[in-house]
């Protein structure tokens, strides 16, 4: 199993791991190497993986399967790493696409397909940057969090692991009122420059949206279910049967919610209660941002 991941210095690192069956029949996984990847072509990656295995005296003739993500350099049928590995080793090594990557990709593209969801995540990222980019603002928020038992601090939005955003959604849900109060306080009372006051006021107003609250509550539930299935797919003890059943079960959740009036109403009712606590009128706010479009008379 191999994957490319950029680190904080923007270097592309190649991680190589093996999954094996021990003498006692138990499954084991071991991370063998993390190295900077210079050649990102299929043949370059395949050569790098084989060099790592050979340097560790691992018999490549016993390679039974290979698993990577869906990038063309890894999964390509002609010049991808998976095809080149079979050619270099001298026998066919079946390629199994990484299902955890598949879930992550599906979530990423689904979220980007909705402007409202994309805007919500943009606001979450802006809030995180606003507080963590300044020691003073960060300390103001932390002092407010001391009033809450077991409070979670803001989480950064991972660019590569979309299912990890479940933690960010959970933190925002629990800290919603405190963040609003802190943003309002910074925009009015705290001695900061006008630019910071304007930014705080802008974030405060964007958070006072029923659309934002609705998607926040709905996606918190969905993302946590996706996080569970992703962690299962990454489990060392995973088997094919359990993986298939878990994927099917998770994929049915949105359809079940869409076809069940109660499950569809529950997050909406929860969003309404959440909005009332923040002194937001759900009906008024919805009408403000979702006005009925009247067709011009000349087009009738």
Image: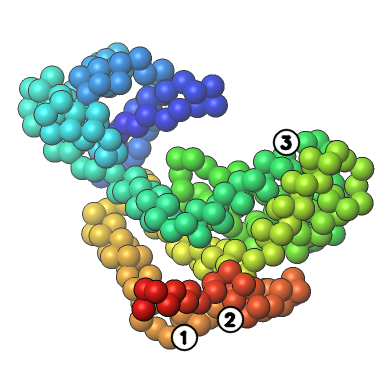
Q: Which residue is mark 2?
A: 269
Rounded to the nearest angstrom, the CA distance separating label 3 from label 1 is 42 Å
Seen at 68% across and 74% down, the residue is 275
Indicate the quadrant where residue 205 lies. Answer: bottom right
- Identify the secondary structure beneath mark 3: loop
CB under 8 Å between discs 3 and 2: no
- For the image shown, how many numbered marks are present on the structure? 3
Viewport quadrant of the C terminus: bottom left
Mark with earlier residue (3, 2)? 3
Indicate the quadrant where residue 146 lies. Answer: bottom right
Seen at 24% across and 54% down, the residue is 240
Query: Which of the numbered marks, if any, corresponds to residue 262?
Result: 1
Percent position (x, y) of residue 249? 32, 68
Label 1 Cα crowd, 10 Å radius (few <14 / some 14-19 / many 20+): few
Indicate the quadrant where residue 242 lies. Answer: bottom left
Viewport quadrant of the N terminus: top left
Percent position (x, y) of residue 280? 71, 73
- Identify the secondary structure beneath mark 1: helix
Mark with earlier residue (3, 1)? 3
Percent position (x, y) of residue 9? 54, 22
Label 2 Cα crowd, 10 Å radius (few <14 / some 14-19 / many 20+): few
Most extreme residue toward the front is 298
Seen at 52% across and 68% down, the residue is 218
Viewer-nearest residue: 50 or 262? 262
Tell whether 211 sits left or right of 25. right
Label 3 Cα crowd, 10 Å radius (few <14 / some 14-19 / many 20+): few
Rounded to the nearest angstrom, the CA distance separating label 3 from label 2 is 35 Å
Percent position (x, y) of residue 124? 61, 51
Q: Nearer the viewer, mark 3 or mark 1?
A: 3
Q: Which residue is mark 3?
A: 133
Mark with earlier residue (1, 2)? 1
Answer yes or no: is residue 227 visible. no
């Amino acid at each position: 199993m191999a994957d490319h991941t950029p680190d904080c210095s923007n270097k592309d690192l190649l991680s190589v791991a093996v999954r094996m069956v021990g003498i006692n029949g138990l499954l084991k996984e071991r991370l063998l190497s993390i190295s900077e990847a210079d050649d990102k072509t299929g043949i370059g990656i395949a050569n790098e993986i084989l060099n790592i295995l050979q340097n560790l005296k691992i018999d490549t003739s016993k390679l039974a399967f290979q698993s990577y993500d869906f990038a063309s350099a890894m999964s390509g049928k002609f010049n991808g790493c998976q095809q080149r590995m079979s050619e270099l080793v001298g026998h066919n090594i079946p390629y199994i696409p990484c299902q955890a990557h598949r879930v992550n990709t599906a979530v990423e593209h689904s979220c980007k397909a909705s402007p409202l969801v994309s805007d919500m995540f943009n606001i979450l990222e802006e809030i995180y940057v606003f507080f963590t980019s300044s020691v003073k603002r960060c300390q103001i928020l932390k002092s407010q969090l001391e009033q809450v038992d077991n409070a979670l601090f803001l989480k950064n939005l991972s660019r590569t692991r979309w299912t990890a955003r479940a933690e960010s959604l959970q933190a925002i849900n629990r800290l919603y009122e405190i963040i609003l109060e802190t943003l309002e306080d910074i925009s009015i009372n705290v001695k900061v420059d006008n630019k910071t006051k304007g930014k705080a006021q802008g974030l405060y107003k964007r958070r006072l949206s029923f659309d934002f609250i609705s998607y926040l509550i709905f996606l918190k539930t969905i993302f946590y279910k996706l996080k569970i299935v992703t962690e299962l797919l990454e489990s060392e003890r995973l088997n094919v049967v359990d993986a298939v059943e878990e994927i099917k079960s998770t994929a049915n959740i949105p359809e079940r919610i869409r076809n069940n009036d109660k499950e569809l109403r529950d997050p909406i009712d929860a969003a309404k209660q959440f909005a009332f606590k923040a002194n937001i009128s759900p009906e008024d706010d919805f009408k403000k941002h979702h006005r009925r479009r009247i067709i011009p008379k000349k087009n009738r």
